[in-house]
Amino acid sequence: MTLIEAILLTVITASTPLLIAAIGELIAERAGVLNLGVEGMMIMGAAAGIAAAITTGSSAAGVAAAILAGMALAAIFGLLVLGLATNQVAAGLALAIFGLGLSGVLGAPFVGVPRAGIGKIEVPFLSDIPFLGPLLFRQDPFVYASFALVAGVAWFLGRTRAGLVLRACGENAAAAHALGYKVLRIRFLALLFGGACAGLAGAYLSLVLTPFWTSGMTSGRGWIALAIVVFASWMSWRAVAGAYLFGGVTILQLHAQGAGVPIPPQAMAALPYLVTILALVLIMQARGGGSTAPAGLGTPFVPDR
Amino acid sequence: MTITRRTLGLGTAALAGAAALPGALQAQAPLNVGFILIGPVGDFGWSTMHDVGRRRMLEVLGNRVTATQVESVAPPDFDRVANQLARTGSRLIFTTSFSYFQPTMRVAPTLPNVMFENATGTSTLPNLSIYNARFYEGRYVQGVIAARKSRSKTIGYIASFPVPEVIHAINTVMRGAWSVDPQMRIRVVWVSAWFNPAREADAARALIDQGCDVICQHTDSPAPLQLANERGVFGFGQASDMTRFAPRAHLTSSVNNWGDYYAERARAVLEGTWRPGDVWGGLNSGMFRLAPFTNMTPEETAEAERIRDAIAAGTLHPFDGPILRQDGTEVIPAGQRLTDDQIRAQNYFYRGIDVAMP
């Protein structure tokens, strides 16, 4: 394996949790709900995932528990912002803090319990393709899941009637409501999907990337996922670019340091953020400005009865 | 009681009620000791070991003390948390990170009735003590072991921030390695965090991909060691005994033990004998020890034990001269030894380390 292959492999694993969480949040935001609690749902997924995996001895049970934990938190958030029409920003921030705290309690008995990570699965024949084969087809199941998620979400939003309805709820909830669509139900389902993805991303951290539990182990990745949705201007394929750009620069700067490139580490650490902001500015320039956010994003909707 | 920064406010009202108790009762009230931690108590590293120390203090002093602990406090929040602890009755506060040293220097004069103790700080005040362990002694042993174990003759070092504590540790690892093999080299990656498991693991991946086959870490999670295990190279645990995370990769861990010091200092406050101090305990002080050597041949173990014991006995000193900076200028000639203040102020790499100082 060459150094370049090794670097790219690491980039893929570093980017995958960001991508999975971002694609879930993207769906929620396209439905018009801003859920800032991704970090909280993600770490709950990480905690529930490893707790279930250690207790039952089954990685699959861990993944399922992580998804359910993310959805449970999203459901609480949904009851607050959809049922009670509370402020989405405040409720989202509260959810992030709540998740961090609760995961610490849930994970306490599992601190310092080591566990073997989920291994890689080779796709027959395809993994023998030179260079691309090992990168794309000799990966852990989460990487394949992230590819499938992106393709599925892109197809759903762009090619299906249900996707169109979901987007209508995000652009103009009143109009969707007038057409007879159940806006709150659709938004709630979108939130649950976002929670499931965040939980799955958390499981990737605690079951694959660093298979153990320590509290606070997501270290702000949920917030990065939120930023990637904005970077992607709410388009699923661009979320891939955003996640891989961020993950790629993060890994490259670590390699550059190891190789002794004489740039201060503080500047290196800021590089992923700088590059992402720069790319965003360039995209906006090329398009000639203007907001691309769903028009109804963050606005509570109360159906008139 | 362990509480998070966010719920600290909730306790204030209850404690305010306690403050209204009659004076006679208050005189018998136990001493409340505050602890401010940089990471989560469940990091299985630095912060966990301070929590273990806190529990040891409670065990030793029983009902004469209580403790209030606030975890994961970012340095910008430090002033608020410290003031809150002081207001709610803590008369002795341990601020357990170098990142809190400057904030503690700033806050301590404004709270003259509270005794502060900063871990790894570099100067004292009338109500501020500093305490630290001479972890570099363990780093020297790590360097010796690394030179024996490495095939590629390259050590990978996952560093947090370019502060003297980390810089002199890197220098000392290489001092130890060169004592075995002068050809040893080092690569350094700064991750700009004390605790970020996935990034620490990514840094370890990068170093291993670049040919390092012994990983030293100056960050708090077991992630780098665990990755070393997965990739078939060696590593050292940080702060607590991390053997179980890497049964095939673990060589030794530096295991911190703050409990006896915490109990002693709390007792001093209770008895009115607390004075600002500057404690820097080595291997012989019990403030830290090396976990049992694993994955080493009997000869390698014997050598590591011999070096460790020589350092503990004071017959081998990692900061004996001659010491040359990277550019070749002499810090001290042969026959001299760096003073503690000089060690604590180290902001240069030794000659032979071909890594740029950030």
Image (cartoon, rainbow, N blue to C red):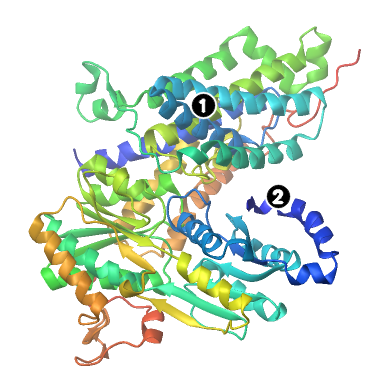
Q: Nearer the viewer, residue B237 or A63?
A: B237
Tag 1 subunit:
A
Q: Can I make out residue A231 in this image?
A: no
Neighbourhood count class around disc 1 (C-alpha, 10 Å): few under 14, some 14–19, many 20 upward: many
Relative to residue A167, is residue B340 depicted above or below?
Answer: below
Q: Residue at x 59, y 9 (%)?
A: A160
Q: Which residue is mark 1?
A: A66
Residue B27 lies left or right of residue B21; in this view the side is: left
Q: Residue at x 28, y 67 (%)?
A: B139
Q: Nearer the viewer, residue B98 or B315?
A: B315
Local SS, label 1: helix
Q: Which residue is mark 2?
A: B7
Q: Residue at x 82, y 26 (%)?
A: A84
Query: Which circle, 2 or 1, is nearer the viewer?
Result: 2
Relative to residue A190, is residue B259 depicted above or below?
Answer: below
Give the percent coordinates (x, y) of residue A124.
23, 15
Give the percent coordinates (x, y) of residue B141.
22, 67
Tag 2 subunit:
B
Give the percent coordinates (x, y) of residue B183.
12, 68
Q: CA distance from mark 2 to mark 1?
A: 26 Å
